[in-house]
Amino acid sequence: MMDGGMYPTPWTHFVASQYVNWCHIDKFWSMHKHDTHVKKNATHFSRCKDHCMKLGLVGVHLAIWGTQEFEYNVVPLYMTQMVYTKVALGVEMDWSNIPTSSRSQWKPNLHHRIAWLIETWPNPLRGKSIL
């Protein structure tokens, strides 16, 4: 687990986006899709190889849009970066500044909803990866 390094914790989306790049994210997806991911600035949910990462993505998506289903199975880069920071690095995240669209149903309580979902994950999933 990291304490945030030179950045104060919790990390914001900006800090996560500065640190977590495709070289980190690609560890959880097949490398043959790297060019597609970079081009679209998104990943394909069903092709994620890590169960903990998938649970994190579903939890955040549920908190933002109130559904577990990803439209067209696409996960935006910003969400992948923030969930990677929490799941793989174990760094606390400030979920209040996660980019969302006007479609978001839960924006007023978003930080608390995401934090609650992540803290209620079973213990083996916090800060751990199966890779």
Image (tube, rainbow, N blue to C red):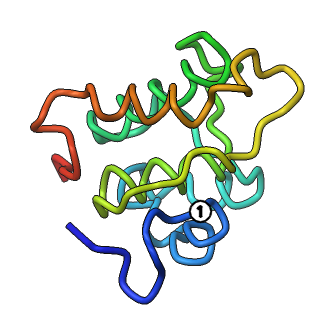
Q: Left or right: where does residue 123 sit relative to residue 6?
A: left
Q: Is residue 129 left or right of residue 56?
A: left
Q: Most extreme residue toward the bottom, as rendered?
A: 6
Say left or right for 97 vs 113. right
Q: Give the residue pinned by disc 1.
A: 12
- In screen coordinates, is 104 left or right of 64? right
Residue 125: x percent and y percent?
19, 38
Question: Residue 10 at x, y = what percent?
Answer: 46, 62
Numbered disc 1: secondary structure:
loop
- Image point 47% across, 55% down: which residue? 93
Q: Is residue 128 above or below residue 67?
A: below
Where is 53 relative to 29, above or below? above
| Front position in the image: 38 or 1 | 1
Residue drawn at x 54%, y 53% is 94
| Residue 37 vs residue 100, the one in the foreground | 100
Q: Residue furthest right?
A: 102
The quarter of the displayed image where residue 101 is located: top right
Along the line of sight, which residue is nearer the eye, 61 or 30? 61
Q: Residue at x 37, y 75 (%)?
A: 4
Percent coordinates x, y for residue 29 in the rendering = 42, 49
Residue 63 in which image quadrant: top right
- Looking at the image, which residue is at 29% across and 34% down? 119
Q: Residues within 10 Å of mark 1 (few under 14, many from 20)?
A: some
Which amino acid is tagged 1?
Thr
Q: Nearer the viewer, residue 48 or 107?
A: 107
Name the spot of residue 30 as percent of width and height, x first: 42, 51
How many marks the image carries: the answer is 1
Can you say which quadrant of the picture contains the N terminus? Answer: bottom left
